[in-house]
Amino acid sequence: MIRPLAGRVLIKPDDQVKETASGLAIPDSHFEYEMSGRVVMVGDGPASAHNVRKATLRSVLKVIDRVAVGRVFCTELLAVKADVQQKLAVADSLAEVKEGDRVAFPYTAGTVMDVDGQRYLLMNEDQIVAVLEAE
């Protein structure tokens, strides 16, 4: 099996129906806009710029807390800390792609990999355009 690295995601693409129920062939140009599939595996490490930003915000909070040990906060530092905490709360609330998610991505996204007769796509997480939720 393939193990994606860093911010990459391994996706099992959905089978594309090449023919209608009545037997009419569907041209390949029909599939050039968007495809979908299921996330099989997510690489370790920062999955996207979004995760790198969250790690940076957490580092800033640690530095502020380290500087403040045994000292009284100045008003400006308190304001910066509150702003960083607010941005981190927003970043934490955003959904990330996880194994089992059904996702949509452009036709041109990813690299096709053939493993044991199965077709997979390996792509950067930021190439995924949407998580498709069941209705």
Image (cartoon, rainbow, N blue to C red):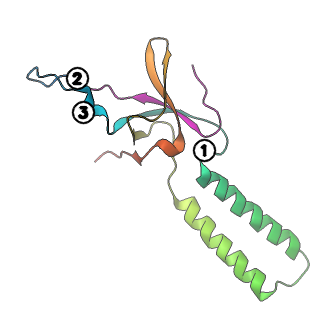
Q: What residue is shown with label 2?
A: 18
SS state under label 2: loop
Closer to the observer: label 1 or label 2?
A: 2
Apparent side of residue 62 relative to residue 3 in the rendered image (left or right): right
Q: What residue is shown with label 1?
A: 47
Dot 1 amino acid type: Ala
- Residue ID at (65%, 45%): 46
Which residue is outermost to the bottom?
Answer: 75
Please say if the residues under marks 1 and 2 sit with CB atoms less than 8 Å apart: no
Please tell me how crowded label 2 is: few (under 14), some (14-19), or many (20+) other residues with Cα within 10 Å.
some
Please say if the residues under marks 3 and 1 sit with CB atoms less than 8 Å apart: no
Closer to the observer: label 2 or label 3?
A: 3
- Foreground of the two, 127 or 63: 127
Per the image, is 3 magenta? yes
Magenta-highlighted residues: 1-18
Residue 29 against residue 97 in the figure, above or below? above
